[in-house]
Image (cartoon, rainbow, N blue to C red):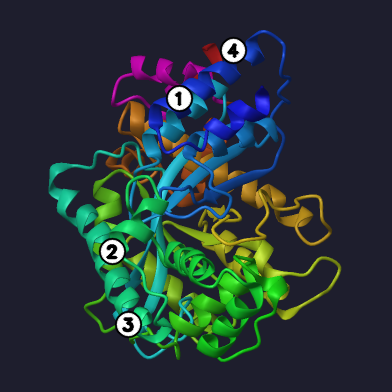
Amino acid sequence: MIEELEGRLDSFDGDQRKEALLELCEKVEAGQIDLPAAGIDVNIHCHTFFSYNTYGYSPGKFAWLARKRGLAVAGVVDFDVLDALEEFLDACKLLGLKGCAGLESRVFVPEFVDKVINSPGEPGISYHMGVGFPSATVPKGQKDFLAGLRETAQRRNRDLMGRVNKHLHPVELDYERDVRVLTPSGNATERHICSAYARKAGEMFPQADKLADFWSEKLGMEIKTSDLPETRDLLNAIRAKTMKRGGAGYVQPDHGSFPRMADTNSFILASGGIPVHTWLDGTSDGEQEIEQLLDVAVSTGAAAINVIPDRNYTPGSPSEKLKNLYHVVEVAQRRHLPVVMGTEMNSPGQKFVDDFQSEELEPLAPVFLKGAQIVYAHSVLQRTLGLGYTSEWAKKNFDSVAEKNKFFDELGDSLQPGREDDLADLAEDASPNEILVKIGDL
């Protein structure tokens, strides 16, 4: 019965998801399911099926599993949309889970126009995030920008699919019928397109040897029957050989393909979020100039940095990427930039949560926990009082970023999810100390 309810959490029907979560909560109340106390593990960069989650997780499903795993803080980040926000934060409230939500997109950084940053093969283009949004309903003046992110991404996908269709003929997709149906609100990604091609090819070539021959010819590499019909290796090969640099469907983006970082940060700030510069692994020309890159990002509004630890080391094997990870965390701490992190789960094989007990990550675990608690505290204060980390209130009440970080870390650590709304009793000009005293009385 529990497994069946958990399966319904991934339904595209929002009412079914809500009913399933309520039934699971009832079983918790009845003592039929035991949930652990929160530990120190965090993942505040998980994509949901509103963009692409490799396991098909809905916002509610991720919240439920995060609570079952005892995560200290959990957060969702979808590409170009805030569609998961309300469902996720509502689920967190039901479950007693500290949560936050945001979005990810790609931006143009004119100061690095001639250097690859973190989008491989694309100079001047950077993945970028906003976290801790208080609501999916952004201010009136920001609605067009948010809608533009979604529309631009879908237009890119349609154009890309058209070029790939010609290359993969006779396996061709219809965007509405084959691709957009794979995600609840139609916000498809390149990974959805890859899955759709794999499934369409499987339908057209039901015999494994014929299917392997088709993919081997079209991708210009040996595809074995063991890779079929939709393994991680095949999906990655489809994406690499048809959609990325050098692929049949790839077109080098120009400066107008993505919004500027500065404009995106303005949107995030105006919508109550925290702009976040994202970091990949420190190997690109741009990321080797991380100090200058952060100077640009911070000057346009970025106030935190994102890392993906699991991509940057092989357990038990020292590497250059692991060294780079430690370096960028040191740079972030020196600059008092909260570190946002998570495992994404938008590609097959990615973990639910990083191994914080590993030799490689254990020394960094307190930094990651602090960053997550800061974003959680911001999310709550911004949502209830408009007094978040990037607010005018914060600028007036803290003499330094270090002092601000200390307050939001303490608040995020002490505040319990079931009592978040009680903060609404405070005045909008409450002092940081009054807020801490309030949560001490809750």
Q: Give the CA separation, mark 4 to mark 1.
A: 12 Å
Nearer-N-terminus badge (1/2): 1
Residue 273 in percent (x, y) is at 35, 46
Q: Residue furthest top?
A: 30
Secondary element at image label 4: helix
Nearer-N-terminus badge (3/4): 4
Image-based side of 208 in relation to 150, left or right:
right
Q: What amino acid does circle 4 point to?
A: Glu
Image-based side of 158 in relation to 340, left or right:
left
Secondary element at image label 2: helix
Q: Give the CA separation, mark 1 to mark 3.
A: 39 Å
Q: Which residue is mark 1?
A: 18
Secondary element at image label 3: helix
Number of other residues with Cα within 10 Å of mark 2, as a class: few under 14, some 14 to 19, many 20 or more: many
Q: What amino acid does circle 2 point to?
A: Gln
Is residue 412 among what the camera can see?
A: no
